[in-house]
Amino acid sequence: RWAAAWPAASVGDLAFSPDGRLLAVASRGDEVRVLDAATGAELLAIGGLCEPRAVAWGPAGLSPPLLAFNDGPRVRIVAIEHEK
């Protein structure tokens, strides 16, 4: 369908949103990206993080969906706005 523009070795974790429309990718550098799962288009990049290694979505049915990821020793939870 589509291929990522970054090397697979730089991916720490990835997770599909509960509705399957979004894909969150934690890089081994300093960024979490939110992509359109169907096209691979980048919708959001959250940079300046401390080696994010894990991403997880909140439960289905939340609007906007919640995305959790680690930022060094902290866990951040953000609401992800996107068009349906």
Image (spheres, rainbow, N blue to C red):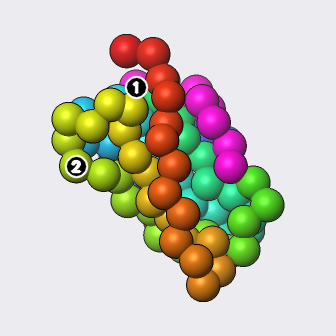
Is disc 2 surrounded by few (<14), some (14 to 19) or many (20+) residues within 10 Å?
few
Residue sitting at x 72%, y 66%: 49
Residue farthest bottom in this picture: 73
Disc 1 versus disc 2: nearer the observer: 2
Residue at 72%, 74% (x, y): give it.
50
Please tell me which residue lies in front, 70 or 6: 70
- Is there any visible trace of residue 83 in the rendered image? yes
Report whether 20 appears left or right of 48: left
Query: Secondary structure beneath disc 1?
Result: loop
Helix or strand or loop: what does disc 2 sit on?
Answer: loop
Depicted 26 relative to depicted 72: above or below: above
Q: Is residue 2 visible?
A: no
Residue closest to the eye, 68 or 17: 68
Relative placement, left or right, of 69 versus 30 is left
How many numbered marks appear? 2
Give the position of the C terminus as an image quadrant.
top left
Residue 62: x and y, percent? 27, 37
Q: Position of residue 26 (x, y in %)?
A: 56, 60
Residue at the outermost top position:
84
What residue is disc 2 on?
Answer: 59
Q: Amino acid at mark 2?
A: Pro
Q: Which residue is mark 1?
A: 38
Region rendered in magenta: 37-46
